[in-house]
Image (cartoon, grey):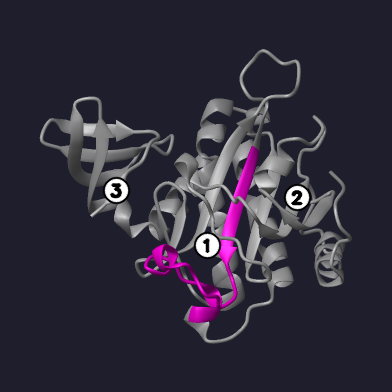
Amino acid sequence: MDSDPLPSDVSRAVSRARDAGLLRCLAPRVLFFRSVDSTNGVAGTLDADAEGVVVVADTQTAGRGRRGHTWFSPPGSGLYVSVVLTPGRARRDADRATALLTLSAGVALAEAIELETGMSPAIKWPNDLLIGTRKLAGILAEGVSVAGSTGPPSRVVLGYGINVGRMSYPPEVARVATSLGAELGRDVDRATLLVATLVRLENRYLDLLEGRFGAILEDWRRRAPSHRGACVRWETPSGDETGVTDGIDESGALLVRTRHGVERIASGAVRWD
C-alpha cells in the first residue's frame, strides 16, 4: 500500500526533533495516509526490519480499539498513530518489558499532553486516558509475527488515538468522549503534539529496553488514581465478579480485592462502576 506525501508541518516537526537528538530510535520513517482502515493494520504488514517506523493517518475508516471495539476517527480531528516496536529485545526480562508496553505508552502520552497543553489526563487501566470521566485517548498493542515464524510474536504494533480537535460525535460516543480542543476552548497543533508523543514514547520505550521498570510503574501509579479504591466488575466462567481495585503488580496486572481475596487480572474487559 503506497503512502501519501507527508504533510509539510509534520515533516518539519519531525526533522526538528531529529536534529535536536530527541528522536534516535523512533520515526526513522514516517508513513502518512490520508485515509486507511486502521493504522495498526498497515503497520502490521511492514517488513521485518521496520522497528520504529511510524504510521499516521488523517482518518481511519475502521480504527481498532480493545476487544473488537472501534475508535471514532474523523478526518482532521485527531491523532491516529501506530509504531512498530520490539520490546522482546530488552536487555533483561523481555516478557516483563512486553507486558508493560501499554502502561508505559499511557505514561508517555500523558506526559506529552501535559507538556503541550498543561492538562494532566488521568490514566485508567489498562489503556485509556481520561479528562474527568470522559475518554481523551486510547492505546492498543497488538503482537505481530513475521511471515514464516513459528514462535511467539516478534514485534508489537503500538497504536494510539488522541481526540485533538473539537468534533461532533455520534450519540453513543458523545456520552463518554472529549477532546483537547473541547476542554481547552482552543485549537491544538496536531503536528507538534504528534512529535511530542513520539519523543516521550521513545524515552519510555528506552526505559523498557534498559529494564527501568520501577520508574515506569511509579509514574503510572501517580497518574492513575483509579488503580486503588475503585469499584469494578468483570466476567468469569461462573458469572460476573465484583471487587475494589488494589493497585497493580510488577508486570502491570490489575489487582482487585474481592470477597474471595485478591484477584489478579492481566487482560480482559473490566467495567468501572
Rendered image: mark on residue 271:
3
Spot occupied by residue 239 in the image (x, y as percentages of width and height): 19, 31
* Mark sitting earlier along the chain (3/1): 1
Q: Quadrant of the C terminus?
A: bottom left
272 to the left or right of 82: left
Spot occupied by residue 199 in the image (x, y as percentages of width and height): 70, 58
Q: Residue at x 51, y 39 (%)?
A: 100
User: Which range is magenta?
Assistant: 157-182
Mark nearer the viewer, 3 or 2:
3
Check disc 3 and report its element: helix, strand or loop: strand
Q: Quadrant of the N terminus?
A: top right
Check residue 175 for magenta coloring: yes
Q: Residue at x 60, y 65 (%)?
A: 112
The crowd level at tag 3 (other Cα within 10 Å; few <14, some 14-19, many 20+) is few
Looking at numbered disc 2 in the image, what kind of residue is underneath it? Val
Are discs 2 and 1 less than 8 Å apart at CB?
no
Q: Residue at x 54, y 50 (%)?
A: 139
Label 1 belongs to which residue?
Answer: 110
Label 2 belongs to which residue?
Answer: 54
Check disc 2 and report its element: helix, strand or loop: strand
